[in-house]
Image: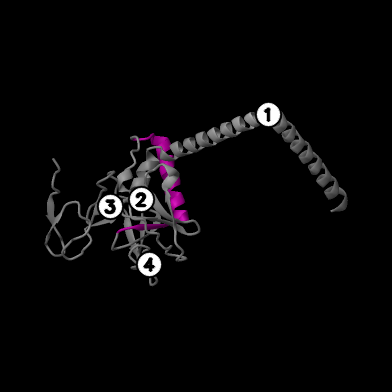
Amino acid sequence: MPTTPETMNCPSCGAPVPSDATSCTHCGSRLAVVACPSCFGMVFAGAKFCSHCGAALARMEIPSAVKELCPRCQVGMDTVVIGATNLSECPKCEGIWANAASLQKICADREQQSAVLGAASPWSPAVNDIEKNIRYLPCPVCNKLMNRVMFAKCSGVVVDVCKAHGTWFDKDELRRIVEFIRAGGLDAARAEEIDELERKRQQLKAAQMARLSDPMERRAYYDRAHNGIADAAANLFTSFFFD
């Protein structure tokens, strides 16, 4: 039987709100923010430790005269430093924009933690959470529509990527990516890619062997190989004496 979330009172207006709410449905005040430098989880304002991983919180907002627009809401994003990582955060939808350098550092640091500590638990992608109504979002920097890709091809988390400038994470997606990496997800993704390349190599080899079983195909294959060697030798001769 599903349980109903406990209620608490909004510190701004006093209205009752569910304990898992991140903003007040009455006055709109934010009740939770991304503040964990370890897992980048959302925690309630005023907390000292992350409710997801127990790490000490470290969040600092940096005033900025010019704010990049949230690709989903088109409102100015706040510049925040979570631990030692610079990010941009939308105060409305609570999405996160990470530039290429910040995301690379996040991935490298969490993968190193995974290697040292070992995977805490196997990763189970929440496939049902993938957005059904696809909407392509503009990059906050160049305003070009970003590509939608599944992070590492097997994480179950679809993110919006501008190859030149960064990656957009909807609410709580960055924390899910961190969990995926800590569970050894990047190693699994690399192993799967290597296996796929080997399968394609074996299929190509089998196709070549099948063609070479035909005498006509075999003769044509060796003719192409011979002509290729002759052409390469001629090119080398020309290059050496006339270039």
Up-down: is 94 above or below 149?
Answer: below
- How far, Cα to Cα, is label 2 from label 3? 10 Å
Q: Secondary structure at mark 3?
A: strand
Task: Residue 132: give x, y in percent of width and height.
Answer: 33, 52
Residue shown at 47% from the left, 65% from the top = 142
- How far, Cα to Cα, is label 4 from label 1? 62 Å
- Which of marks 4 and 3 precedes in the sequence? 3
Residue contact at pointers 2 and 4, CB within 8 angstroms: no
Task: Residue 96: give x, y in percent of width and height.
Answer: 36, 57
- Which mark, residue 174? 2
Q: Secondary structure at mark 4?
A: loop
**Closer to the camera, 34 or 82?**
34
Q: Secondary structure at mark 1?
A: loop
Q: Residue furthest right?
A: 241
**Can residue 222 be seen from the camera position used here?**
yes
Task: Residue 109: give x, y in percent of width and height.
Answer: 43, 45
- Which of marks 3 and 1 precedes in the sequence? 3
Q: Secondary structure at mark 2?
A: helix
- Magenta-drawn stretch contains 114: yes
- Which kind of residue does numbered mark 3 sit on? Met
For the residues carrying marks 2 and 3, which lies nearer the camera in this image? 2
Task: Residue 222: give x, y in percent of width and height.
Answer: 75, 33
Up-down: is 242 above or below 53?
Answer: below
Determine which residue is flagged by label 1: 214
- Which of marks 3 and 2 precedes in the sequence? 3
Q: Residue furthest bottom?
A: 65
Q: Quadrant of residue 14?
A: bottom left
- How far, Cα to Cα, is label 3 from label 4? 21 Å
